[in-house]
Image (cartoon, rainbow, N blue to C red):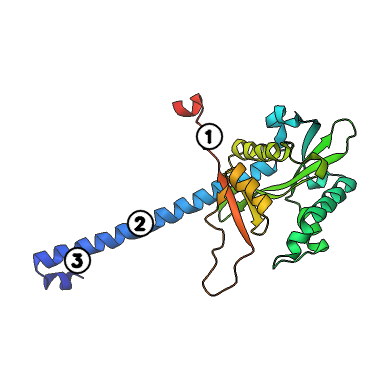
Amino acid sequence: MLSIFRRLRPRQILTVTLQAQRRTAKSKEKRQKKQQEISRLKASIAKVEAANKLEDPLSMLMPFKKFERNGLDIKIECSKVSELDKETINWAFQLTKSNMQSLYEASDWGWSDREKKTEMTEDKAWYLIARDLDSKKPVACVHFRFDLECDDEVLYCYEIQIMPEARRKGLGKFLMQILELLAHKTDMKKVMLTIFKHNPVGRDFFVNKLKYNVDEISPQTPLFEEEYCYEILSKIMPEKKPSAVEKAT
């Protein structure tokens, strides 16, 4: 290396030195960026794991365990699928099938009892179950999960299903409000869901009434190919304000 520099003029030596410094700086920057990405992913995983370890997430929202409006007197429970009895699980599946089978069959996905049952009973599944306070019978359910989506911590709503007699009374909006509050309380970045494009009632509910937007990961229809039958919607959660103790530190 010394022999090379001896053959270079001072200005050339300075140029070579600066180029080497830039390469070193860029390499260091890349390592730092990679480390930041790893740290962020670890933090996201930790948040999801912490949320899934909760015994009853709804205990953070005690006022939301009841819904008393428009002729409904409802008690709302939150639990993992493993804690639900078989009768409730079967009811949730049958309600989902009754409400959704025709929409699935009108899509590229098709309907499969086996696949839907498997999805609804996977270990990660959480449920909100809304029961009539007098009869104790369920009238609505929400299947959701705390999970990672493209390395982001999210609360993903898989199903929100309501019995015909309990619809158009504000219960669906109330249940989605619970999900958004749970997402905020557990530090999830956003609430996400998938909806069929040929479900105008559902899309109106989420987009127009609840102000969900098409998510950045929702598939875009490519030119000269068939249109996707679904889209992914989301609502970003506001960041938590730091406490007085956190501000002091």
Asked if residue 115 lies left or right of residue 212, the reply is right
Distance, label 2 to label 3, CA atoms, is: 18 Å
Query: Does 174 appear above or below 43?
Result: above
Q: Which mark is residue 240?
A: 1
First along the sequence among labels 2 and 3 = 3
Of tags 3 and 1, the one toward the viewer is 1
**Depth check, front residue: 48 or 21:** 48
Distance in Å between CA atoms under marks 2 and 1: 32 Å
Residue 222: assigned label: none
Q: Which residue is mark 3?
A: 16
Query: In the image, what residue occupies the spot 50% across and 30% down?
Result: 242
Q: Position of residue 60 (x, y in %)?
A: 68, 31
At label 2, which amino acid type do we have?
A: Lys
Secondary structure of the residue carrying tag 3 is helix
Quarter of the rendering containing residue 190: top right
Q: On the picture, is 169 further left or further right than 232? A: right
Real-space Cα distance between discs 3 and 1?
49 Å
Q: Residues within 10 Å of mark 2 (few under 14, many from 20)?
A: few
The local secondary structure at tag 1 comes to loop
Rendered residue at 52%/55% (across/down): 216
Q: Residue at x 16, y 64 (%)?
A: 15
- Please name the residue shown 61% across and 52% down the image: 148
Among numbered discs 3 and 1, the one appearing first in the sequence: 3
Picture layout, residue 202 above or below residue 138:
below
Whether pointer 2 and pointer 3 mark residues with C-beta atoms closer than 8 Å, the reply is no
N-terminal label among 2 and 1: 2
